[in-house]
Image (cartoon, rainbow, N blue to C red):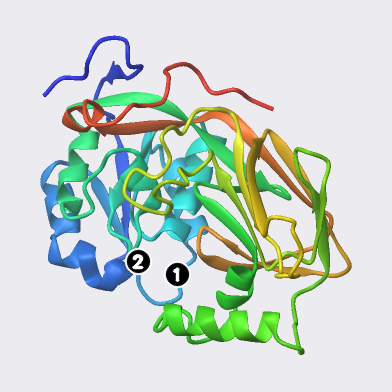
Amino acid sequence: MTPSRGIGWKMADPPRAPVLFVNPRSGGGRAARARVAERARQQGVEVVELGGDQDLRALVDQAVADGADALGMAGGDGSLGVVAAAAYAHDLPFVCIPAGTRNHFARDLGLDPSDPAGGLEAFGDAVEGMTDLGEVNGRLFLNLVSLGVYGEAVQRPGYRDAKARTLLETARAVLGESGAVAEVSLMDDRGAVHRNPVTLLVSNNPYSLERPMSRGARPRLDTGRLGIIVIDAPTGGTRPPGRAWSESSLEVGALSTVHAGVDGEAVEIAPPVRFSIQPRALRVRVPRRNAAQRRPPRPGRPRRR
């Protein structure tokens, strides 16, 4: 299947020295079951399988120093973010293999999470486009930064094994008399100030609110806008409990260090928390057949700050 004319992808020559990083444990062993590492090697792709306490950033830096001309990652959203940040920094194309649990970025590129090995076609018969990257206090993200209930939840030891239960327990603690979320405040696009919101979600491009967090939940990845959703604590008044809007930047004030989830990874961020977006910053390769299934990012060269 070939991409339709005028939708933005451009044909791309196969890389000469691609490197794929594989987390065989991610997504409950999704990459291992699909034999992603084995199949990548059969295509002539150098594979680095992660294990133990290896430093992914250091491994990626070494691959770049050794001459890699394309970087791929088969793993969860947090690992994808590390490799994508390196690809951005070195102006290299990035290949996303959907081998995580939620696969937000892969889904919004039109990739099929049930077929991780199919994503390997991006190293061969592929097209290339440009997507935006989100940034929070100098750290890049592909999908989402969360503060508040969800940001607190990813700090809990049981989060990975029982996400729903942990999130409910955290919500109970935050909304109860012993609320533990650091006091934060922000102003929305209408000039209203939100203090101590229960949850703040800032995404790399807006999610569709008609079907949030579902397959293809971001209609585009190249609008140059952050998606912002704030949920306020219930007050019993007439003011709506939250608001959604988009901006190219956002600043959140806080009295102390903020617990956050960055692409699902637990981090602590010192205030003020500043969000911005890097328009059309990341070169992304996808299989040519996938480009016809999704409205893609526009082509062009990365914008440098």
User: Total label count?
Assistant: 2
Does the residue at mark 2 contact the one at mark 1 (Cβ under 8 Å)? Answer: yes
Give the labeled residue for mark 1.
Answer: 54
Residue 221, how many percent across, how many down? 46, 34
Say whether residue 227 is visible.
Answer: yes
Disc 2 designates what residue? 50
Give the alpha-carbon distance from disc 2 to disc 1, as whole Å.
7 Å
> Residue 68 at x, y = what percent?
38, 38
Residue at position x 41%, y 83% in the image = 162
Amino acid on which the number 1 mark rests in the picture: Gln
**x and y percentages locating residue 288 in the rendered image:** 20, 27
Q: In which quarter of the image is the C terminus?
A: top right
Image quadrant holding the N terminus, namely: top left
User: Which residue is nearer to you in this view: 292 or 22?
Assistant: 292
The residue that appears at 25% across and 28% down in the rendered structure is 291
For this view, does 96 lie left or right of residue 122?
Answer: right
Residue plotted at (83% across, 41% down): 191
Residue situated furthest right in the rendering = 255
The local crowd at label 1, few if under 14, some if 14 to 19, many if 20 or more residues have their Cα within 10 Å, is: few
Q: Quadrant of residue 213?
A: bottom left
Q: Which residue lies furthest to the bottom in this view?
A: 178
Label 2, residues with CA under 10 Å away: few <14, some 14-19, many ≥20: some
The amino acid type, in three-letter code, at marker 2 is: Leu
Asked where in the image residue 293 lies, by quadrant, the reply is: top left
Q: Which mark is residue 127?
A: none
Which residue is located at x 35 percent, y 27 percent?
Answer: 296
Q: Is residue 65 visible?
A: no
